[in-house]
Image (cartoon, grey):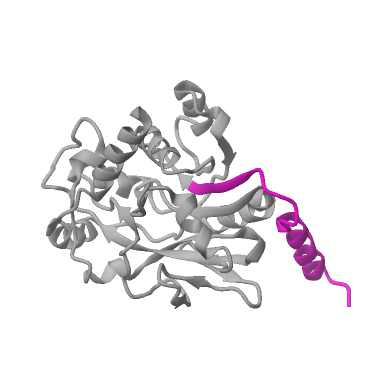
Amino acid sequence: MFSFKNLLSKFRSSRTDQSVESQYYLSICCIVKDENDYLAEWLDYHRKIGVEHFYIYDNGSKRPVKDVMAAIGYSEWVTVTRIPGQNMHVKAYQHCIDNFGYNSRWIGFIDMDEFIVPKNEDANLPQLLEKYEGYGGLGLSWLIFGSNNHIEKPAGSQLENFTRRSEVSFPPNRHIKSIVQPRFVQSAFKSHCFKFKSGYSCVNEHFVPIDGAFADVSVDTIQLNHYYCRSLEEYRQKVERGISDTKRKRKMEEFHYHDSESNAVEDTTILKILDKLKAQQSN
């Protein structure tokens, strides 16, 4: 029986059919609002670990992201789409799957305060993903980082300024974010997870199926550094920006709750990876 829903489903399937080789093996999708100060470091880092293209959704930044990309010379690697309004996270992700999914074997869906940390020998994310090609997606566990007792926004690299994180057992670390194969995705479900086509699912690094937005923390071969707090000043700015995946407003109490638990462990894994990548480039 004909219906618009069936037609839309067929259209989505045709757009994400990857019987032909994709232009990119790995891309990242992200929705942002007034986070221009962090763009360059986030883009530079993820390019170093093997990300080839970025789909950035501008949720109403005062200075358009497209202008920032041109200013820092990144337009070649970034596709910017304007998507103003509240509660746009899932809509942005679905738009990316529908319109750009055919162009990438894998797309990671993360935020600007999240950095993917592959722990394989070459710190190469595409290489790590190869063994998961038979699955719909790879779920990444959060490790929430704290303020390092910074009150005001410190100058320089956030990766160098914020090196202390929560214990693995900190409950919010059970959130997962996903790197998915668009051809196996049925739809974006929440900002943390996707619905997959029959026969496919999201798994953790040890191939344990993940059903939903939460899973036991597993960070042996890959982790997702979540710079949730940064400094107190930066968190206040985050409160003012609002949240793109819900109409709920952040509260300063959330900073104090997370920060009180997120300076427990010194974790410089990401800095060691950057040193390793620099050494590889110089050889």
Q: Is residue 214 left or right of residue 229?
A: right
Q: Is residue 155 above or below residue 101?
A: above
Name the residue located 36 percent from the left edge and 54 percent from the top edge.
120
Q: Give the left or right position of residue 1, taking residue 34 as reference.
A: right
Residue positioned 20% across, 30% down in the render? 155
- Asked which quadrant contains residue 195, the reply is bottom right
Residue drawn 23% across the image and 46% down it: 230
- Across and down, in percent, residue 46 comes to 42, 42
Q: Position of residue 105 (x, y in %)?
A: 61, 53
What's the magenta region? 1-30
Q: Residue at x 20, y 36 (%)?
A: 153
Give the position of the N terminus as an image quadrant: bottom right
Q: Is residue 29 left or right of residue 23?
A: left
x, y percentage for residue 192?
Answer: 45, 64
Question: In this picture, is 155 found above or below 128?
Answer: above
Quarter containing the C terminus = top left
Q: Residue furthest front?
A: 283
Is 16 in the magenta?
A: yes
Q: Does residue 205 show up magenta in the picture?
A: no
